[in-house]
Image (cartoon, helix red, strand yellow):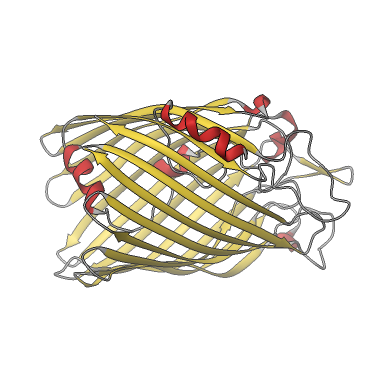
Amino acid sequence: MKIARCLPALLLVAIWQQAPAQQLNEYQQLYQYQPLTRFTPLEKEKWEEAEKPLTLRLSGGITYDSNLFRQSDEAGAPTVNGDKDDIVYRVGGGGRYELQASRQTFIAEANVNANKFQNNDNLDNVSDAVKGEWKWQVGNDWNGVLGAGQARYLESFSNFQQNVKDMINEDRIYGSANYLLHSRLKLSVDGYYLDYRHGDDSREVLNYKYNNTAFTVNWLTPALNSVGLQYRTADARYPNDQIVDGVAVVNDFHENEYSIVSRWMLSGLSQIDARFGYTERKFDERPFRNFSDPTWRLAWLWQVTAKTAIEFGTWRQLEAFEDLTANFVRITGWSIIPTWSYSQNIAFRGKVAYMDRKYVGDPGIAPVTERRNDKDYIYQVSALWTPLRLTELALTLETGKRTSNVDFADFKYNSIGASVTRYF
């Protein structure tokens, strides 16, 4: 019934960026791994138009979530102070400016969204993300990127299940340099610095600063496919010690990773991006928390027909501090993302994903005999319609669930979102 009541408001809003159930995370959209899936024909027109120096976007939309705080349905589960379901209204916009100067490219990009909760209005917020980037080139053999960005957004409720307005602030500096030593041999160095801060005082112990540097030697083929060896090293510093059983625990760690990396076009219609490696993470305190295990990320895009594409992905990687029970989580997962362009104006996308989350970084005084283990299942379908040039309407349906070996950590949810976006 609540969904039906909110549908008329769809005519009044002016933007929305697609997001699954939880609040928008512009940082992920700007900086994190993006699917390989190629643009559908209706999206292609938009990006061809975006070749002009300045592009602008206005959008708005509505999302209904049946279990906003990811509460468990188990008997005796604690309740959250607030309405379990909610409708979120979003209005915002963004812009991108690109300047070409000889062989140099300068990019400035910004996005901002106002998020209004119909029932839990204490969560109302404005999220934003900005970045500036310089794509540089010196001669024919040297090139790279230098940039900086900032993002602010509402933390997901999936891991702490409380009605708390915890606004995340992230500052990032990143850069890379590539040197073509030989027509078949490229040397690369990539690095970034991340300052991650929680706005809620009770979660400041999760704040951290992260330095990461990767060195790669790539062998190139005449078709510009590549395979290489990579060494990555990283340091994380947590300025606020965590108190466990009355004892202050330092969560700082050092990480080394050794990998084989590759980007390969199997044909004009098939592409693979892959990394297979071995990751070691060592803590300054409590060595029983140390981690050493294989990790990987593989994405295979297959353009089945001119209108149909499927992306298969699998990964095993570490993610930073998720909640107050573990310093890091090992996630093993897979996803299937099919895309179908029904016509020049209508496209559909589906998504099925599974994630096995092991909380292997418990900061306790002694080793844990049985660690927390969650399993997430996500099913999503989206429809995109372009009724007018550079104007898109989107509808996204999603359902998901989590099972866990910890009491009251499991949950189920359903969501529906609709939006309209105008590009200029």
Tell me the quarter of the image containing the C terminus.
top left
Quarter of the image that includes the N terminus = top right
**Visible residue check, residue 23:** no
Residues 29 and 106: in front is: 29
Q: Quadrant of residue 316?
A: bottom right
Indicate the position of residue 225 as horizontal and vertical percent values: 23, 68
Q: x, y percentage for residue 324?
A: 75, 46
When asked about the image quadrant of residue 108, the answer is top left
Q: Is residue 282 above or below residue 236?
A: below
186 versus 175 height, above or below = below
User: Is residue 385 in sight in this rendering?
Assistant: yes
Q: Is residue 209 above or below residue 141?
A: above
Residue 221, x across and y down, in percent: 18, 71
* Image mark count: 0
Question: Taking 289 as reference, is 63 left or right?
Answer: left
Q: Position of residue 42 (x, y in %)?
A: 24, 48
Q: Is residue 307 above or below residue 80?
A: below
Return the residue nearer the eye: 87 or 171: 87
